[in-house]
Image (cartoon, coloured by chain):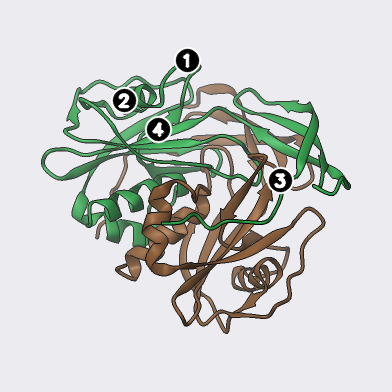
Chain colours: A brown, B green
């Protein structure tokens, strides 16, 4: 299909300064100018590394998910494994690493499902989503200091009902699951 | 279906302080403690209002999309209308308002598609996604000072190819479109 075209021109951001450094992310302040050269008020963006997530599928028709405490929402969250892509690491490697560390599963390979922008309004990073077929348990997890996960197996046939129930609420994991269901015609 | 259960316990966040105020969002710093009472290093969260987006559908089988310059990615972005839910405003009202302001379309009503968390790892807000059927052009947009949008019509039958092309990259809009396609069995 044709990508819908636009007559809009990009605006210009310049003179970025670090307005705050909070460890896993920094806040930058930029001057902003329209294509006609009109200066606008300064804007802030939120700078962080690229992320990945992975839908691990077992040969007996389950998706490997994890429960994890998330301090953004101050709640336990049902998700698929994922995390930050480290410096010098490929997205594929990061996905397989997170699968092993968070869920205690491994897989022979990953297939790319999508590359999306988590929130182009405020941040410039990308999220790489993968499918990992033939996932098998290692029985061995390895959590970060701020992490504690519990692995659960969800039948693939239950995914539509799970998504529709509202119990699965992480948008960046939900979009990967929805794309997976569409591609697999499930 | 049964919601998969967990034995994990919630951690505790306390003593929040404002670590940075950047207008449309604030950064908060919290003390963090595990269920066993172990203190962990402080964590930062990113506080912002709830968001909404809407898939406007015309009676002749098109979705109303917008092109918009986004300074998070410093690029033009193809999206569905959406934005911040104002104080005291319902998500439904915000969706219809953004549809009119950004795209110059109106609709008689919206149907709720999903309520998701944009990123539970770092932020506590929610995004409400809607479908607005029988959308019709008003010919009149109303942009914020930092906004400039161009409306484009995309045939519904082209949505899967558009999503698979990578040309549509806003994750929070993509998840709404994917859920719409699944519910409509398209």
Residue corresponding to mark 2: B96
**Marks 2 and 4, the one that precedes in the sequence:** 4
Residue corresponding to mark 3: B10
The residue depicted at 72 percent of the width and 44 percent of the height is A25
Q: Are marks 2 and 1 in contact (CB under 8 Å)?
A: no
Q: Nearer the viewer, mark 3 or mark 2?
A: 3
Label 2, label 1: how many angstroms apart (C-alpha)? 15 Å
Q: Which chain carries label 2?
A: B
Q: Determine whether the residue tagged by mark 2 lies in a helix, strand or loop.
A: helix
Q: Quadrant of the N terminus of chain A?
A: bottom left
Residue B87 location (% of width, % of height): 50, 16
Which one is nearer the viewer's eye here, B104 or B177? B177
- Is B140 left, or right, of A83 in this rendering? left
Q: Nearer the viewer, mark 4 or mark 1?
A: 1
Residue A160 location (% of width, % of height): 37, 58
Q: Determine whether the residue tagged by mark 1 lies in a helix, strand or loop.
A: loop
Q: Determine whether the residue tagged by mark 3 lies in a helix, strand or loop.
A: loop
Which one is nearer the viewer's eye here, A88 or A167? A167
Residue corresponding to mark 4: B82
Residue B183 location (% of width, % of height): 27, 51
- Is A60 left, or right, of B46 in this rendering? left
Q: Mark 1 lies on which chain?
A: B
Q: How crowded is mark 1: few (under 14 residues within 10 Å), some or many (20 or more)?
A: few
The residue depicted at 70 percent of the width and 42 percent of the height is A71
The residue depicted at 43 percent of the width and 18 percent of the height is B89
Label 3, label 4: how many angstroms apart (C-alpha)? 32 Å
Residue corresponding to mark 1: B88
């Amino acid at each position: 299909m044709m990508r819908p075209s636009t007559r809009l021109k990009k605006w210009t951001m310049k003179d970025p300064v670090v307005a705050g450094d909070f460890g896993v992310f920094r806040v930058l302040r930029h001057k902003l100018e329209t294509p006609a050269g009109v200066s606008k008020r300064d804007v802030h963006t939120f700078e962080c590394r690229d992320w990945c997530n992975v839908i691990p599928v077992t040969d007996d028709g389950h998706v490997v998910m994890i429960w994890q405490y998330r301090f953004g929402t101050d709640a336990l969250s049902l998700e698929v494994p994922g995390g930050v892509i480290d410096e010098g690491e490929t997205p594929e490697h990061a996905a397989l690493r997170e699968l092993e560390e968070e869920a205690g599963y491994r897989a022979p390979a990953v297939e790319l499902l999508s590359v999306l922008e988590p929130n182009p309004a405020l941040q410039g990073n990308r999220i790489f989503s993968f499918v990992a077929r033939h996932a098998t348990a290692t029985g061995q997890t390895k959590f970060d200091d701020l992490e504690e996960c519990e692995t659960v197996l969800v039948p693939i046939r239950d995914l539509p009902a799970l998504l529709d129930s509202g119990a699965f609420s992480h948008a960046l994991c939900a979009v990967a699951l929805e794309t997976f269901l569409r591609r697999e015609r499930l």
